[in-house]
Image: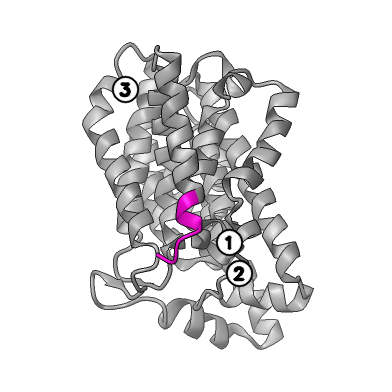
């Protein structure tokens, strides 16, 4: 099956759509309801306003996952971290998001992650660009949009510092352009809330009540702990293999890998001082992890081993969806 996704052509990209519904097919056996995420006032308001039904939300969530997977693949192909334009980053992103229904269910986290991926794409474009003002502003804007849907993404402003340091050297003026992009989003959004008379509700529910004075405030039950353990295991595996991944990589690819490492670190920061109520938060870590794993998978020379590994994790994702863990 991996042969179908070794070339980035239109027909293969379209095949990712049925692939998503196969990997996330647990919904067709067990009718999982969409998770109601607390402290997600903006997203819940939009769902209430649109009146989306459960089936529509299910298909819309998979469309969002498809779009995010394609953007990640295009980013990897542009920097050439996977050979021959392979679709492996999309493949791994789909599989990892299938480890638990809370991850691929439609929520404010999933919507925010789309803007997060667009932010990553933006800041990775500043390498060797003489004037990156607009690109840096866009990065800050996307982080701002992600944050108003899911507050912990505000931690990703730190990526502005790391991205500048890795790709072109830190300059305070350029970092201020990032802050301007984020500040513009919050200013416009807060102005809208003020006119609607909902400003206090948004800040109280989605910001003040969400953050905690304690470092670790994960309050979700045992459901999703197996998926969390697997994701953390894969992260440790990639951390051990990090130096090997960079071997023989071009300079642009090495810088990209360094930046992905900082993304993983900031993803860990995002769980600090926040009341984590769902395993869906782990999609922040899944985003860079899927790229790292796609690079490892693309370098497996034994095709039988690669196919077996792919089939194992694909079936594991489907199996986990059928469990009450």
Residue under label 1, please give it. Answer: 105
Question: Which is more toward the observer, 284 or 253?
Answer: 284
Please tell me how crowded label 1 is: few (under 14), some (14-19), or many (20+) other residues with Cα within 10 Å: many
Q: Are marks 2 and 1 in contact (CB under 8 Å)?
A: yes
Residue under label 3, please give it. Answer: 245
Numbered tag placed on residue 34 in the rendering: 2
Q: CA distance from mark 2 to mark 1?
A: 6 Å
Label 1 residue SS: loop
Residue 82: % across, % down:
48, 20
Quadrant where the C terminus sits is bottom left
User: Quick check: 282 left or right of 189?
Assistant: left
Q: Residue at x 49, y 40 (%)?
A: 314
Q: Residue at x 66, y 35 (%)?
A: 16
The span shown in magenta is 319-325
Q: Nearer the viewer, mark 3 or mark 2?
A: 2
Q: CA distance from mark 3 to mark 1?
A: 32 Å
């Amino acid at each position: 099956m991996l042969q179908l996704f070794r070339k980035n052509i239109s027909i293969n990209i379209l095949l990712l759509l049925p692939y998503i519904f196969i990997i996330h097919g647990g919904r067709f056996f067990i009718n999982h309801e969409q998770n109601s995420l607390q402290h997600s006032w903006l997203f819940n308001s939009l769902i209430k306003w649109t009146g989306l039904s459960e089936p529509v939300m299910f298909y819309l969530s998979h469309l969002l996952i498809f779009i995010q997977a394609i953007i990640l693949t295009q980013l990897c192909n542009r920097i050439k971290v996977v050979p021959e334009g392979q679709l492996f980053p999309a493949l791994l992103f789909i599989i990892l998001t299938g480890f638990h229904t809370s991850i691929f269910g439609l929520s404010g986290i999933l919507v925010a992650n789309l803007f997060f991926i667009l932010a990553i794409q933006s800041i990775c474009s500043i390498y060797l660009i003489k004037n990156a003002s607009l690109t840096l502003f866009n990065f800050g804007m996307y982080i701002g949009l992600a944050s108003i849907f899911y507050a912990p993404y505000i931690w990703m402003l730190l990526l502005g510092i790391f991205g500048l340091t890795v790709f072109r050297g830190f300059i305070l003026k350029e970092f201020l352009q990032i802050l301007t992009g984020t500040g513009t989003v919050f200013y416009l959004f807060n102005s809208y809330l003020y006119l609607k008379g909902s400003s206090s509700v948004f800040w109280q529910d989605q910001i003040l009540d969400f953050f905690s004075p304690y470092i670790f405030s994960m309050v979700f039950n045992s459901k999703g702990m197996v998926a969390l353990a697997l994701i953390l295991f894969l992260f440790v595996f990639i951390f051990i293999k990090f130096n090997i991944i960079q071997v023989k990589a071009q300079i642009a690819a090495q810088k990209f890998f360094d930046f992905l490492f900082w993304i993983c670190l900031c993803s860990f920061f995002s769980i600090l001082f926040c009341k984590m109520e769902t395993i869906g938060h782990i999609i922040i870590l899944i985003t860079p992890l899927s790229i790292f794993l796609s690079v490892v998978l693309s370098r497996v020379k034994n095709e039988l081993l690669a196919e077996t590994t792919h089939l194992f994790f694909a079936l594991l994702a489907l199996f986990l969806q059928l469990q009450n863990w």
